[in-house]
Image: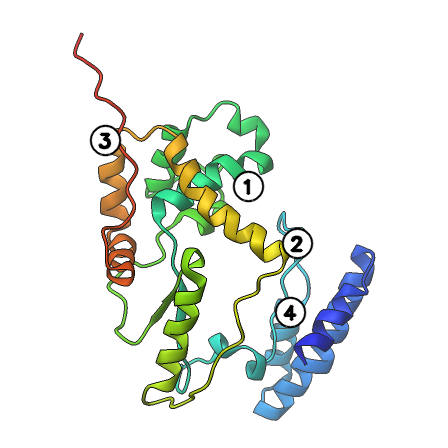
Amino acid sequence: ARRAITASFADARTAEDYSAAADRFAREWHEQEAVRLGCDAAAWHKTANVALPSVNREERPYVSVPLALSPTCCRSGVGRLRVVMLRNPFVRIASYFLGDWRRAKPGVAAEVSFEWFVEEALSAQPNRSILDPRDLRHVTPILEAPPAPEWVFFRLEDAVGSVRRVEEALCAPPLWRCGPLPAFPSGSSCSAKGRRAGGAYVRALSVGWPAQLLRRVEERYAFDLATEAAVTGQPAFRPPALPEKPPD
């Protein structure tokens, strides 16, 4: 089913073709799902509106998939294993600042320093011209509270170990779904992602981190950093602080 869905979108050559494919997908999949669940017409139309493309500075718009193909859509989570992608906050912030954010907002980036960018990311009400809601998805903490003990964390830097942890969690009660998972993709594009994951730490070291800013990030992302330490069995990554300026 996933291959059929992917193929239908891969055949689209224009935005109109893509919208038509999304509309057909929504009706052929979501309408049938709504009928199966006994949803009324209003609920079906709402689902269709969510499924149809809405481009927000993305190369390709997102579409949602039916419940049977999307375990994370299960409301109660019964019989599901929650797997959370975990990244170091210092790495996330620096990587996004030096990469996608600069490319998306070259005019703003020319005037905003890294320290200013991080201050806005830590602010309760960031300047929307610097960090809009889409930007905040990339820099807000992954965890706002201690994670549940049954959650499994996946780290791109340790794909093999992460897959093993997922396998072990699936094979444990109450799921008892034992068996090897497919190997983590190792194609050229995925290899490039792996290289970028390692290079992200280099980028985090290439920007200046004043000591006060490091402490604020550690406070704001405390649960992310504590979970990273628990998963890796060693202290979470922390870039060195810039030398203190001597008093005038």
Dot 2 or dot 3: first in sequence order is 2
Dot 4 or dot 1: first in sequence order is 4
Secondary structure of the residue carrying tag 1 is helix
Quadrant assignment for the N terminus? bottom right
Residue ID for mark 3:
211
Residue ID for mark 4:
51
Secondary structure of the residue carrying tag 4 is helix
Dot 1 or dot 2: first in sequence order is 2
Q: Which mark is residue 100?
A: 1
At label 1, the amino acid type is Asp
Q: CA distance from mark 4 to mark 2?
A: 12 Å
Picture quadrant of residue 123: top left
- Neighbour class for label 4 at 10 Å: few (<14), some, many (≥20)? many
Of labels 1 and 2, the one closer to you? 1
Report if residue 81 is visible in the image: yes
Residue ID for mark 2:
55
**What x and y, as percent, mark residue 170?**
39, 82
